Image (cartoon, rainbow, N blue to C red):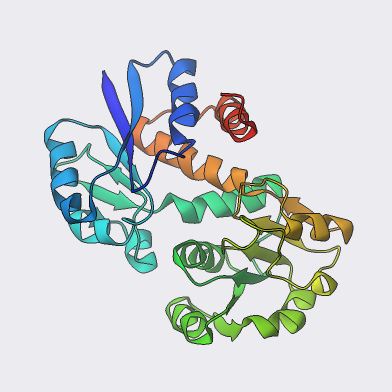
Amino acid sequence: MQVFGLLGNPVGHSLSPPMHEAAYEVYDMDARYVTFEPAPEHLATAVEGAEALGISGLNVTIPFKQDVLSLVEPDDLAARIGAVNTVDFSGDTPTGHNTDADGARRALEEQGDASLDGATAVVVGAGGAGRAVAFALADAGSTVHVANRTVERATALAADVPGASGHGLDALTDLVPEADVLVNATSVGMEANESPVPAEALHGDLVVLDAVYSPLETRLLKEAAARGATTVDGAWMLLYQGAIAFERWTGRDAPIAEMNEALRTGLRGDR
């Protein structure tokens, strides 16, 4: 039996197990997806132990995405982003990858029908998700503007991303009306009915992705839809990053429909 898993702390809330196991069921794979919750001081031992036990692959989530970087051989994208969310043990050395970036890109392109090459994109947030999204958009040919509550973090991220610029949140009133793509990469909207973007800045030519997936329809997405914008909920980004990891580990095409159904069933609380 193949074993895949998720490394994080905490991970009890994760919807990755049902999403991945739905894919195993489609292919009749003898595989399981489990969660691991090591103490931070035991992270290196956990990764070494996973390799020693023959675990096929790991996803990595908060708070370990940055720390795992030094424990594996990162690919170019993961190294540039500074974070790993997928570990592959199939080679002689564990390799690290960041599927959050391509997950965001695929969500925008496939669900938002966004044309990213030549687009003007605004990314709200300069944390781990913001870094992944900013690099994904720049690599796809977009001009990226990063807006963050702490301006210094936005400018620091922008300095790493080719052609990007950093701003405070007050710049959103000027940036968003001129943008083609808007991504909320913060947690604003998860715990309260709030949006990080002024509603009056939104417009009908925008494609808006909110990385928050609980709730699925955030205040930002509601206000964007009311303005005629195309909206993409955060579950699509979560789905695609998982699908890309599945494809890397198994060499099979991810069964998107079945994985999506399992994910959204979990989000509805039906599991």
Residue 34: image x %, image y %? Answer: 34, 30
124 or 177, nearer to the observer: 124
Q: Quadrant of the N terminus?
A: top left
Which residue appears at 34% of the width and 66% of the height? 82
Residue 18: image x %, image y %? Answer: 48, 27
Is residue 195 in view from this perspective?
yes
Which residue appears at 31% of the width and 40% of the height? 58
Mark count: 0
To which quarter of the image does residue 14 belong? top left
Is 223 left, or right, of 188 in this rendering? right
Residue 268: image x %, image y %? Answer: 65, 32
Residue 131: image x %, image y %? Answer: 47, 67
Is 216 left, or right, of 185 in this rendering? right
92 or 238, nearer to the observer: 238
Residue at the front extreme of this rendering: 192
Q: In the figure, 55 relative to 224: above or below?
A: above
Q: Quadrant of the C terminus?
A: top right
Q: In the figure, 23 relative to 123: above or below?
A: above
Which residue appears at 34% of the width and 55% of the height? 84
To which quarter of the image does residue 70 belong? bottom left
6 or 77, nearer to the observer: 6
Residue at the top extreme of this rendering: 28
Is residue 253 in view from this perspective?
no
